[in-house]
Image: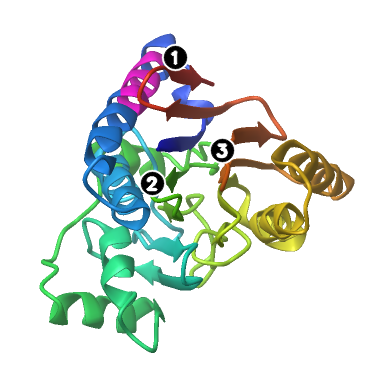
Amino acid sequence: MKLIIHGGFFSESDQSQETKTAKQQALKDIAASSYEYLKNHSAEETAVFAVSQLEDNELFNAGTGSQIQSDGKIRMSAALMNGVNSRFSGVINVQNIKNPIQVAQVLMKEDDRVLGDDGAKKYASENGFADYSPETPQRRQEYEEKKKNGGKGTVGCVVIDAQGRLAAATSTGGKGFERVGRISDSATVAGNFANEFCAVSCTGVGEDIVSNGTATKIVTRVTDGKSLEEAFTKTFEELKAIDGFSGAIAIDNQGNIYHQDSHPTMVFASFDGTSFEVFE
């Protein structure tokens, strides 16, 4: 059993040592509690559990603390993929929800498993998700002052459970000040993908991740016999060719963990029950 989580990239407004330390400690705490949860739950359930905690922590740009778009509203996206049955579910640009990843989890049982905008909100309300404002004073101040803060904040979790099952979950509050209607990579297979061989969650500039097909490429290359490191190296070489900005975390079905970013400011933590790895 192993898991790795990420809290996106440090943005321009996150550069104080105090904020960096707080993010690193939060990731360590969430990794530890999620590993305890994993002892009695599946990879899919644990991925949702971990990402829900990240969504609830306003240090991260997902759920509470999400970025505000150009029209003053917050729209969030999240996706979940089960590597055993290759089922993918997600919500795109949903508003006024506390935990978009939990709506994605409920959608797993549906035929129509990826919903957007008002349809996603309607489905959430019909399934007992209460109205909730994810806005924080810090995000409102940033918006009012039109201070773009880098826009590369996404959270994610990749898990392998005791039965060797893989799952990936990813959630984002967007890049901030974006054009209304813009869709991020987080609720697409470019940013969140898993099968029986490998699971990947990405963060960074959504357009770059989609253009590169980052998560899908890594998983496909591992499926075809490459090691995680080889799959990452090739995929990030292709990302560099388009001057792309991305980071990714992954676990394969042998329990190997790997991560890489195109700019060394991604914050992540992994835990295998014995040792932590917490880096920026």
- Measured as percent of width and height from the top left, residue 106 is found at 26, 72
- Looking at the image, residue 83 sits to the left or right of residue 163; the answer is right
Identify the residue position indicated by label 1 in the image.
16
- Measured as percent of width and height from the top left, residue 198 is found at 59, 52
Q: Main secondary structure of the magenta part?
A: helix
User: How crowded is the residue under tag 2: few (<14 C-alpha within 10 Å), some, or many (20+)?
Assistant: many
Q: Callout 1: helix, strand or loop?
A: loop
Vertical relation: 69 (above or below) 111: above
Identify the residue position indicated by label 3 in the image.
150
- Measured as percent of width and height from the top left, residue 46 is found at 30, 48
Label 3 and label 2: CA atoms lie apart by: 34 Å
Q: Bounds of the magenta span?
A: 21-28
Q: Callout 3: helix, strand or loop?
A: loop
Label 1 and label 3: CA atoms lie apart by: 15 Å
**Residue 207 within the magenta-colored segment of the rendering:** no
User: How crowded is the residue under tag 1: few (<14 C-alpha within 10 Å), some, or many (20+)?
Assistant: few
In the rendered image, which quarter contains the C terminus? top right
- Measured as percent of width and height from the top left, residue 122 is found at 23, 82
User: How crowded is the residue under tag 3: few (<14 C-alpha within 10 Å), some, or many (20+)?
Assistant: some
Vertical relation: 214 (above or below) 50: below
Q: What is the quadrant of residue 216 in the picture?
A: bottom right
